Image (spheres, helix red, strand yellow):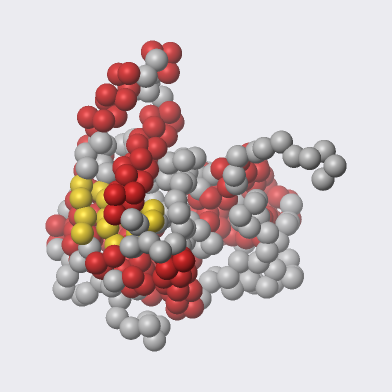
Amino acid sequence: MSDRGPSAFESDALDERAASGTRGSRSSDGLDAGPRPGESGDDADAPLDAADPAAERERVCAFIERTVEDAAADGVVVAMSGGLDSTVTAALAVEALGSENVYGLILPCNKIGAPHARDAEALADALGIDHDTVHLQPLFAQFGAVAPERFDLHDDPVRSGNAIARLRMTIAYLAANATGRLVCGTSNRSERLLGYLTKYGDGAADLLPLGHLYKTDVRALAAEIDVPQFVVEKPPTAGFLPGQRDEEDLGAPYETIDRVLRLGVDRGLDPEAIAERLDSTDCVDAATVADLLARHRATAHKRGPPSIPTDPDE
């Protein structure tokens, strides 16, 4: 633990029901430039150092506190999924602002998300924050009923998933507007660099406390602040389809993805050099590396503001 003090999670605060059914079970904003925490950025052969969890704890808490103060806001709204990123975000927000200034929204939309919603409710209780659970299925069904038939949502998991993510963000901003708070996003750097998020859905926020940290760095930060182990052990998933896992969607586990992105985005190595650099235990070849970097390039529009006409003389 750092010298910041006790975690927002108290050892006896988390109800056992949180683990029921789920235990073990996504430029112009600077994302494309400069070294990440713990990296020099000067030597392509230098070790791939991870961010220091204690230092990042201090950094993120100070960032949250400063951002809310600068906006003259009354706190933050966090959409809680029961997963790692949203739990770490909510815990650090509590540490930075106090539990009375953090409001949690739990927004399930199908049976797949129900166990995770129960986890999120128990985690919010453990953090001592005010929270509400809003079941979005009726809203999503009505949305699909009024949308033009040519844009059927029910046979396309990508379209339906994006629609649900945007409905969730609509509720989050409603809460923020009503309470004078900011929407605190939960996306990490790995997701953002790969565009593994919904534009104007979970990719929308007023602040992104974990936006500079790779997924593997977030896991280390979770240990630093005593996030319950069952949360850390959950396989990362968007939660829209049965059995859906980030690793299958992206083609590699985050341990490999983060190493590829550190070398390809942060240090500018080409796919062949990255594949050669990575240890054989990563089980990644040049084709996988090229696919990840192509995904990064293709999703640049998700990491910046909308394009506008520019002065031809500029």
At x 71%, y 36%, the residue is: 309
- Name the image quarter holding residue 231: bottom left
At x 51%, y 48%, the residue is: 26
Q: Is residue 313 left or right of residue 98?
A: right
Q: Residue pushed farthest front?
A: 72
Location of residue 20 with respect to 126 vertically, above or below: above
**Residue 198 seen by the camera:** yes
**Residue 277 seen by the camera:** no
Q: Which quarter of the figure is the N terminus placed in? A: bottom left
Q: Is residue 66 left or right of residue 139?
A: right
Residue 133 pos. (x, y %)? 20, 47
Residue 92 pos. (x, y %)? 36, 68
Location of residue 246 with respect to 157 vertically, above or below: below
Residue 75 pos. (x, y %)? 34, 62
Q: Which quarter of the figure is the C terminus placed in? A: top right
- Name the image quarter holding residue 36: bottom right
Q: Residue pushed farthest right?
A: 313
Residue 202 pos. (x, y %)? 42, 45
At x 14%, y 57%, the residue is: 17
Q: Nearer the viewer, residue 83 or 152?
A: 152
Q: Nearer the viewer, residue 242 or 29?
A: 29
Q: Nearer the viewer, residue 293 or 199?
A: 199
At x 31%, y 36%, the residue is: 242
Q: Residue pushed farthest top?
A: 149
Q: Is residue 4 left or right of residue 179?
A: right
Total count of labels = 0
